[in-house]
Image (cartoon, coloured by chain):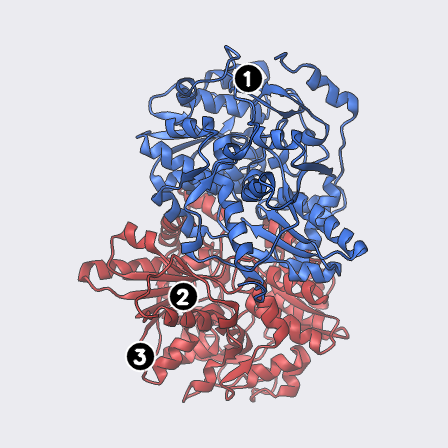
Chain colours: A blue, B red
Amino acid sequence: MINKEIPYKIYLEESEMPKYWLNLRAFMDKKPAPLLDSQTLKPITLEKLSEVFCEELARQELDDTTKYIEIPEEIRNFYKMYRPAPLVRAYCLEKALDTPAKIYYKFEGNNTSGSHKLNSAIAQAYYAKQQGLKGVTTETGAGQWGTALSMACSYFNLDCKVFMVKCSYEQKPFRREVMRTYGADVTPSPSMTTEIGKKINEEFPGTTGSLGCAISEAVEAATSREGYRYVLGSVLNQVLLHQSVIGLETKTALDKYGVKADIIIGCAGGGSNLGGLIAPFMVEKMQGVRDYKIIAVEPSSCPTLTRGVYAYDYCDTGKVCPLAKMYTLGSGYIPAASHAGGLRYHGMTSTLSELKDQGLMEATSVKQTEVFEAAQKFARVEGILPAPESAHAIKVAVDEALKCKQTGEEKTIVFGLTGTGYFDMMSYQKFNDGIMKDYIPTDDEIKVAIDKLPKI
Amino acid sequence: MINKEIPYKIYLEESEMPKYWLNLRAFMDKKPAPLLDSQTLKPITLEKLSEVFCEELARQELDDTTKYIEIPEEIRNFYKMYRPAPLVRAYCLEKALDTPAKIYYKFEGNNTSGSHKLNSAIAQAYYAKQQGLKGVTTETGAGQWGTALSMACSYFNLDCKVFMVKCSYEQKPFRREVMRTYGADVTPSPSMTTEIGKKINEEFPGTTGSLGCAISEAVEAATSREGYRYVLGSVLNQVLLHQSVIGLETKTALDKYGVKADIIIGCAGGGSNLGGLIAPFMVEKMQGVRDYKIIAVEPSSCPTLTRGVYAYDYCDTGKVCPLAKMYTLGSGYIPAASHAGGLRYHGMTSTLSELKDQGLMEATSVKQTEVFEAAQKFARVEGILPAPESAHAIKVAVDEALKCKQTGEEKTIVFGLTGTGYFDMMSYQKFNDGIMKDYIPTDDEIKVAIDKLPKI
């Protein structure tokens, strides 16, 4: 199939869709450090992890040896409802940039959750159902993960309790209503339905909540009632595993047309979409088959990989979850309000952190006004209005393509377009009105939370 | 390819996409009655029509003899950015209904405009650009058409002036911001930028506007300045022509798998999506090749085809556009506020009106609460949250599938899923909160505006 004319959008056949997830850690010579029990500070056991997570998911969380894990048929059938996601050749963007680079993007936004989150949500709901659970609990900030989980739970007829950060609950009523339409029980956090919620409401009357608090409420709601477990949409190893469908489909589509990528770019918040996108390419890189330049893009307001330290830290501000060794700004770091809520996380999934530490992956940070400029340009020439998170990858892909214009190199650039911005129009409005601001923390601001890292 | 296993989603290859639009009127023995000049009440001339519309579009508007019209290459390239739209086999819905019927839907929502409107917007922008115009003007209610036109104009670097009904402008800021992101100039109507707008603002201070007023402002804005023309997103013959890509793709996809449709269903406001969807099937029906049952679905609050009369009427409340012979409730009929803004039109495109009159098409009306029930069920099992307009077709498709369950017939049902409901969450909220109401006008209410029809 080499040199066949490349269509605007490459859709795989159903028969070409992945039947196995790729477990990137299993291919690494030096593995990411193990999760630690927050009470004993020793590597966490399957038993302990299964108190919070579904058993099969806890098993996947700890498995760093099985290279490929079969995707259960029911999940594959659900994937067929909204996948394969297209790999798009950005002909119009190339033309607008007048670059010799070839640009491709894997578009994960063509489903009602509006992002790649559904890939893991359906897997997590499936294993919860298999275990005979009544339901799951989770937290959501902007609402992408909560929406995806609501859809997945509705499909398997599972109860879904979502703790939504109160300010988002009030400011983003549309996402809330999508969740409700899918039958989820959406509670503004901090609520009066949990002990921790009551305590926070008492201590800070009128607080509009935080993701850390919502996590604590969701964990309590899961562990304090029969037949419930807690689920999470990023950061975890299991989530990277499920998200490998992104990279596997991308690789199959490129191979089908004999295209070799040179640069692979993705935005990174907790790291799940990037970890999924790069999985099969990173395997080739580690095996010496091909040398890809792999770039993680983060917001300058939350520069985990570019300005954080590589150390053990708590995954949540409430310190109820296990500790992970990762690039972190400190679990007490509160990123400035930004329009890419999905990238406001103090840490980074341990696999990507280790790959960065080994020099197998680069990282860069970008300012939100330049991100929205790139988003608008992209929307106008490629016809898709991107999520602010995804637009971080667009910005760096455009920069790389412009470098090619200067050097005349015909590099092939692949980036992840994780979602659409239809529920982010208030952010676009700020950009359209010219009142959006950038924020870059000072070294001192970053030092404060890092100084408080646990000494392990 | 007969009896090949049918995937969840059928995506055509780019090479299989239509190269010609199908002009349904050219296949009709008895043609729809001609448009009449609103001043002379005689059939309108190309010259007169070209004062308001682009010349090539005016030509298409009057052409009822050319059966196939070539789609210019630039438009076909734009189509490739978001088409082919998938024809989806609704396996999950069939299972949930436990019906022997086979259900398919043509999904037109996978683009940033969120609906099929883009198919005609890009064609209209193209011809405006070809004519060397500076820009186009239009009106928009809920904003789907305005969004589509903004995207199309941005692509061709045309100025785009959108008059948005003031209450929508204020209540639907997200759609407004999508248009602005694409560079459109969005003005709340009635505005102080046109004579008619000033007059209405003077007569009715504080008015929140109407579609009729916005049309009048858009027409004035186009005709009163050099290098501008007015464009419209439905009702017109040219729009049905462009929308025939929906039906042509659907037919090709079905043929590819040897599937024969029995029932074809679409929602009908102005009639453009339904006219496009049924085009190639109606040709076969008229030629005696196959007898399809074709159903137009309208809201009970605006029952044009089911309770209107077939007569010449004004297309707009301002009476500035030509008159068309169509099923109508009278141009003075003001439909009750409904959550399917795209279906709140007093008339129906003349082609569909004539087909209904000839008995080649059926029509039915449904209540909005039952429409939202169907929408929610569909969202939960098929994973796509539909636009309220599209959900009218879902409701009737489900009804037909349940009839098959009773009779045991394995009928093949195809319906048009014209768009997504991501910008309609306030309507879903009303439904989720259980406070949505139905409205069915009394015979007397309908009689009032019909009695005022022009005597022609």
Furthest residue to the front? A288
Q: Nearer the viewer, residue B41 or B233?
A: B233
Picture layout, residue B2 above or below residue B190: below
> What residue is rendered at 38% in x and 56% in y?
B8
Query: Mark 1: few, some, or many residues within 10 Å (few <14, many ≥20)?
Result: some
CA gap, disc 3 to disc 2? 19 Å
Residue type marked 3: Arg
Residue matched to label 2: B266
Mark 1 to mark 3: distance in Å? Answer: 67 Å
Please state the chain letter of the residue tagged with numbered disc 3 in the rendered image. Answer: B
Which residue is pictured at 65% across the width and 62% down the height? A91
Q: Quadrant of residue A335?
A: top right
Residue kind at label 1, given as amino acid type: Lys
The amino acid pointed to by label 2 is Gly
Q: Which residue is mark 3?
A: B290
Above or below — where is A382 with respect to B306? above
Q: Which mark is residue A319?
A: 1
Mark 3 Cα-neighbour bin, 10 Å: few <14, some 14–19, many ≥20: some
Give the number of the mark in front: 1 or 2: 1
Viewer-side label of 1, 3: 1
Q: Residue at x 33, y 51 (%)?
A: B92
Q: Nearer the viewer, residue A346 or A98?
A: A98
Label located before the other in sequence (3 or 2): 2
> Mark 1 and mark 3, same subunit?
no
Rounded to the nearest whole Å, what is the CA distance between mark 1 and mark 2?
53 Å
How many neighbours does mark 2 have within 10 angstroms: few (below 14), some (14-19), or many (20 or more)? many
* Percent x, y of residue A211: 57, 27
Q: Secondary structure at mark 3?
A: loop
**The disc label shown at residue A338, or none:** none
The answer to whether residue B153 is seen in the rendering is: yes
Say whether residue B265 is left or right of residue B164: left
Q: Chain of mark 2?
A: B
